[in-house]
Amino acid sequence: MASSSEDPVLERYFKGHKAAITSVDFSPNGKQLATASWDTFLMLWNLKPNTRAYRYVGHKDVVTSVQFSPHGNLLASASRDRTVRLWIPDKKGKSSEFKAHTAPVRSVDFSADGQFLVTASEDKSIKVWNMYRQRFLYSLYRHTHWVRCARFSPDGRLIVSCSEDKTVKIWDTTSKQCVNNFSDSVGFANYVNFNPSGTCVASAGSDHTVKIWDIRVNKLLQHYQVHSCGVNYLSFHPSGNYLISASSDGTLKILDLLEGRLIYTLQGHTGPVLTVSFSKGGELFASGGADTQILLWRTNFNELHSKDPNKRNLKRLHFESSPHLLDIYPRSPHPHERKTETVEMTGSTGRALPDKGEDICGYFVNPSLLPPECSAAAMKKKPEDMSELPSESQRSVPLAVADALEHIMEQLNVLTQTVSILEQRLTLTEDKLKDCLENQQKLFRVIHHKS
């Protein structure tokens, strides 16, 4: 089962951050990618080859979320330093600071018209801000634990939020009231968002699940159990037909929402995957994780599988659905070995970079998310040294042989997975056949007894 031309492909990767990647977002024109990290910095990457990357310095603690405004003229970021910053995404990188909350801020999200910004915090509140006047408007209080995420609906009339109190709440921005509440007895949602049409809400669960609720009828529509660890982030394809999830099990999963099944498993990161995002047109998506890498993927299946979501209803999924036989596991090597030039930007109240000998791990509240090589020695490397792959001359095995071996390993992995799934299905079939035979015997006994 070799990968075909419509499968997602790893295009390139970016290295410049010194710690786990927490958030990624494409600019509206698709030419830039903004990233946030535990290293307290934002970075702005130009997707054209051989162009500069900009590092924005200003936050004093972990940056938890980053997002472009709908017009691309602003960049909002949230941080554990309890502030929200608005940046001008250019080579100067000037920023203004909001003293937003009384505890770490977990997420930022612009309304579709760019007029408002919603922030979620560990102070249990959600706050809405006016962007034209850059001032606070109102707070939403109903959660009883840390709020992990808050997002506007596409039309801006609703806000969805999730909290460690194990609830997902829907808010009306006009009445400022909670109008709907979904609760979960098992885990809590790490991330929530509306689908592009605004009719459904998807949640990324700490209990390893992805759930989709129809907010028009207040019912759980789909329930996927495809990950083996907590799900950290979700992103809808702009068509609304697909959903990609990022998990601490080290994988990305692409779900076909019309078919109600898993269609791709992508393994490119070497640790927990913490964030993922489709580009505004859906032709690309980017992922970031605890391995400090940002991977850029080309979607490819976008045009081939495009369907009209209005022609078909979303199918319910069995709670214990097995992965589909056609799941693939692309493990394409990181193809880009060139160095990327980095220019550093300091915000209006910036802080200096740690000294060369200073342990960057000391800045983080949760170093367990960081890769084991995060040490003072590991951090001495300059950020410009983006590539860690050996050159052709340094390889002990010729590149062509290595590629061939990797391809063979890919095929073996796929075959192993397929055999495993077939075994599972055969076992299920045998169990059902056994049940049928037992029921048939019981029926014969009943008939014989009556006669």
Image: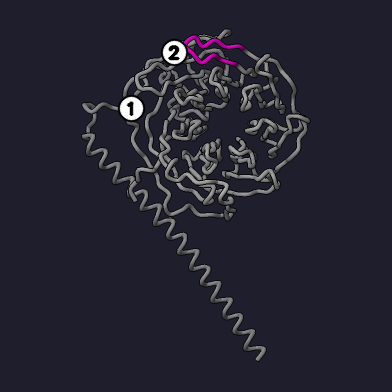
Quarter occupied by residue 116: top right
Q: Could you tell me which secondary element the residue under label 2 belongs to?
A: loop
Position in image of residue 397 (x %, y %): 22, 35
Asked whether residue 382 is in view, the answer is no
Residue at x 41% of width, y 35% of height = 298
Majority secondary structure in the magenta region:
loop
Q: Is 372 placed left or right of 215 in the picture?
A: left
| Residue that label 1 marks | 336
| Residue that label 2 marks | 357
Q: Could you tell me which secondary element the residue under label 1 belongs to?
A: loop
Q: Tell me which segment is drawn in magenta.
A: 86-96
Q: Residues within 10 Å of mark 2 (few under 14, many from 20)?
A: few
153 in relation to 133, above or below: below
Q: Is 130 placed left or right of 358 in the picture?
A: right
Residue at x 55% of width, y 74% of height = 436
Pick whichever, 256 or 104, lies toward us. Answer: 256
Position in image of residue 29 (x %, y %): 48, 24
